[in-house]
Amino acid sequence: MKPNQDCPNATANIRGSSANPCLHGQIRFYQRKNFVLISINIDGLPETSSGFFGFHIHEGDNCNGNNFSGTGNHYNPANAPHPLHAGDLPPLIRCNGGAYQCVATDRFNVQEIIGRTVVIHNMPDDFNSQPSGNAGTKIACGVICRA
């Protein structure tokens, strides 16, 4: 039986930190032949001066701890410099309190990220600073689960 192309292969339910309790949403991951399509739907993003938020896949397997310390560092199996980590993704752009976008990447497949975490940071990634882009505090997190 051919898999349904409309159903995600994995999802992550996002929850905000204690300082951002209204922040929530869902990320869906769709495995395609040569890339992964990521669909992002977030609500409750705080107002910031830039309206941009760092967005990464992290190597950790949980959203526990102070400042989501269980997420660990960016997912980076090739030990590449930032911003070439497999988990480095484009920033989220706040619109009416939410962020809605689709991103395609060929840096990983869905199977590789099952059990890892998705993190939203309070500042935009500068795509330069090592090791993680100076994206600031982790304000939301979700564990990537098989759909």
Image: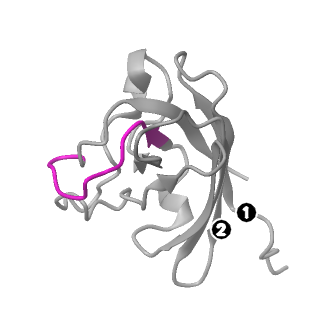
Q: How far apart are marks 2 and 1 (CA)?
A: 5 Å
Q: Where is residue 7 in the image (x, y as percent from the top left)?
A: 79, 66
Q: Is residue 136 above or below residue 98?
A: above
Q: Residues within 10 Å of mark 1 (few under 14, many from 20)?
A: some
Residue at 24% of width from left, 62% of height from top? 78
Viewed as shown, does residue 34 lie left or right of 145?
left
Q: Earlier in the sequence, mark 2 or mark 1?
A: 1
Asked whether disc 2 touches disc 1, contact meaning CB atoms under 8 Å apart, the reply is yes
Using residue 112 as the reference point, say whether residue 43 is left or right of it.
right
In this rendering, the answer to whether 61 lies above or below 66 is below
Q: In this view, does 98 lie above or below 69?
A: below
Q: Residues within 10 Å of mark 2 (few under 14, many from 20)?
A: many
Give the main secondary structure of the magenta stretch: loop
Rendered residue at 44%/75% (across/down):
106
Residue reaching furthest to the front: 49
The three-letter code of the residue at mark 1 reads: Pro
Callout 1 secondary element: loop
Give the residues drawn in magenta, as a range. Answer: 119-132
Q: Give whichever of 38, 33 is nearer the camera.
A: 38
Residue at which label 1 appears: 8
Write the residue at 35% across / 62% down: 86
Helix, strand or loop at mark 2: strand
Q: Which of 95 and 133 is in front in this view?
A: 95
- Residue 77 point in image, percent of width and height: 29, 57
Horizontal side of residue 145 vs 112, given as left or right: right
Residue 28 at x, y percent in the picture:
67, 57
Quarter of the image where one finds residue 22: top right
Amino acid type indicated by mark 2 = Tyr
Check residue 128 for magenta coloring.
yes
Tag of residue 30: 2
Give the position of the N terminus as an image quadrant: bottom right
**Residue 99 at what x, y percent from top left?**
61, 51
